[in-house]
Amino acid sequence: MTLCRGVVPLRLSFMANTDRLIDSAIRGLRKAGRVRKGDRLVFIMGAPPSRRGTTNLLKLHEA
């Protein structure tokens, strides 16, 4: 992913609910000045979050 311009991988704290995790990430990114309203984001994660070694969720989201 680091070969693509504009891709910044982030590791987030555990949350059992993926929608809340994404909302929390967007709030943090906005607060840090990394994204603005209307920016397109891609979230790649494993679901359920408690299961290690799985990457089975891709979500496209608009900030």
Image: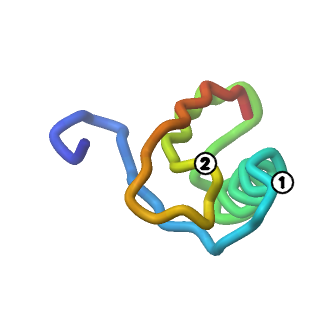
Which quadrant holds residue 29? bottom right
Q: Nearer the viewer, mark 1 or mark 2?
A: 2
Residue visible at 55% across and 40% down in the picture: 43
The front one of 56 and 34 is 56
Number of marks in the rendered image? 2
Q: Dividing the image into 4 quarters, which one contains the N terminus?
A: top left
Q: Position of residue 7 (x, y in %)?
A: 36, 41
The front one of 12 and 35 is 12
Q: Position of residue 27 (x, y in %)?
A: 78, 56
Q: Is residue 5 left or right of residue 16?
A: left
Which residue does the numbered mark 1 point to in the structure image? 20
Q: Residue furthest left?
A: 3
Q: Could you tell me which secondary element the residue under label 1 belongs to?
A: helix
In the displayed structure, 5 sits above or below 46; it is above
> What amino acid does circle 2 point to?
Ala
Which residue does the numbered mark 2 point to in the structure image? 47
The front one of 13 and 46 is 46
Q: Could you tell me which secondary element the residue under label 2 belongs to?
A: loop
